[in-house]
Amino acid sequence: MSVREEFDEWARQGRDEGMEQRHWHTAKHALARMPVEAGETVLDLGCGSGYAGRALRETTDAGRVYGLDGSLEMARNARSYTDDPRIAYLVGDFGALPFADDAVDHAFSMEAFYYAADPSRALEEVRRVLRPGGTFYCCVNFFAESEHTHEWQDKMGVDMTLWSRAEYRAAVRDAGFYVAAQDSIPDREIEIPPADEFPTDEWASRDAMVDRYRVHGTLLTVGVVP
Ligand SMILES: C[S@@+](CC[C@H](N)C(=O)[O-])C[C@H]1O[C@@H](n2cnc3c(N)ncnc32)[C@H](O)[C@@H]1O
């Protein structure tokens, strides 16, 4: 199954809103750190329900926000959740962004980047469309050190790139960014049941769930264009 087919199906099942609820716990902390100034243009890569763009418009003076997704159904759902004329949702692929060079001030991505067919090429594309001084806030929950996320690959019908923290830094650098920050954002909001309630349908042990959410959470890597 292609990434588009997989996420079209998720969108039809309404799973975009479930992702939003789960990802918001940590995504909001990354979004709050973005140095978006009045009138600036922001691109959300793999926007899903489009919550990041909506949040940025509500909390900053962003002039224009583009949510890009490879799934038409995701983009369609995202459009239906807002009538803000300064937010546009586009269907496109990370490997060939439909923007001119230097056209975007800041980019954000949550739990989407590792689906790129060629992640290094995707980083080069983000670098190309960002202006000098522009930033890329790249957030992932699926990464090498967070071992209890690795089984997701078996559950997904599409290939996912499993990089370590160091590999994210190196790839961001190789694409022509400075690495301005790298950080783990723990999910402190998800409820973790007491030990005697494990195993659950999803988790073999409480320790595994603590490791996934409280220890590793979301890996944020911030690239800045020289
Ligand atoms: C796990 S969802 C995350 C959605 C949203 N960012 C969130 O936090 O809930 C990943 C999204 O990335 C999109 N995506 C995956 N690979 C893509 C690609 N190569 N180009 C564009 N979008 C892609 C999928 O269609 C999907 O909507």
Image (cartoon, grey):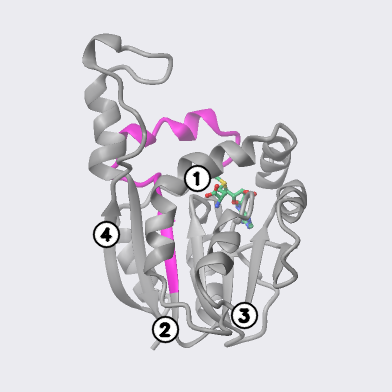
Q: What percent of the width, then of the height, locates residue 84?
A: 72, 66
Q: What percent of the width, then of the height, locates residue 135?
A: 43, 77
- Residue holding disc 4: 183
Q: CA distance from mark 1 to mark 3?
A: 33 Å
Give above or below for 163 relative to 208: below
Q: Is mark 4 within 8 Å of ligand 1?
A: no
Q: Amino acid at mark 3?
A: Gly
Query: Foreground mark, 3 or 2?
Result: 3
- Residue holding disc 2: 225
Can you tell which mark lies on residue 160?
A: 1
Q: What percent of the width, then of the height, locates residue 92?
A: 71, 62
Query: Foreground mark, 2 or 4?
Result: 4
Q: Residue extending furthest front? A: 58
Mark 1 touches mark 3? (CB < 8 Å): no
Magenta span includes 152: yes
- Specify which label sits upstream in the sequence, 3 or 2: 3
Residue beneath the point at 49% across and 29% down: 154
- Specify which label sits upstream in the sequence, 1 or 3: 3
Q: Bounds of the magenta span?
A: 136-159
**Crowd tier of the residue under label 4, counting other residues whose Cα lies within 10 Å: few below 14, some 14–19, many 20 or above:** some
Query: Foreground mark, 1 or 2?
Result: 2
Magenta span includes 31: no
- Give the structural element (helix, strand or loop) at label 2: loop
Query: Foreground mark, 1 or 3?
Result: 3
Query: Foreground mark, 4 or 3?
Result: 3
- Specify which label sits upstream in the sequence, 2 or 4: 4
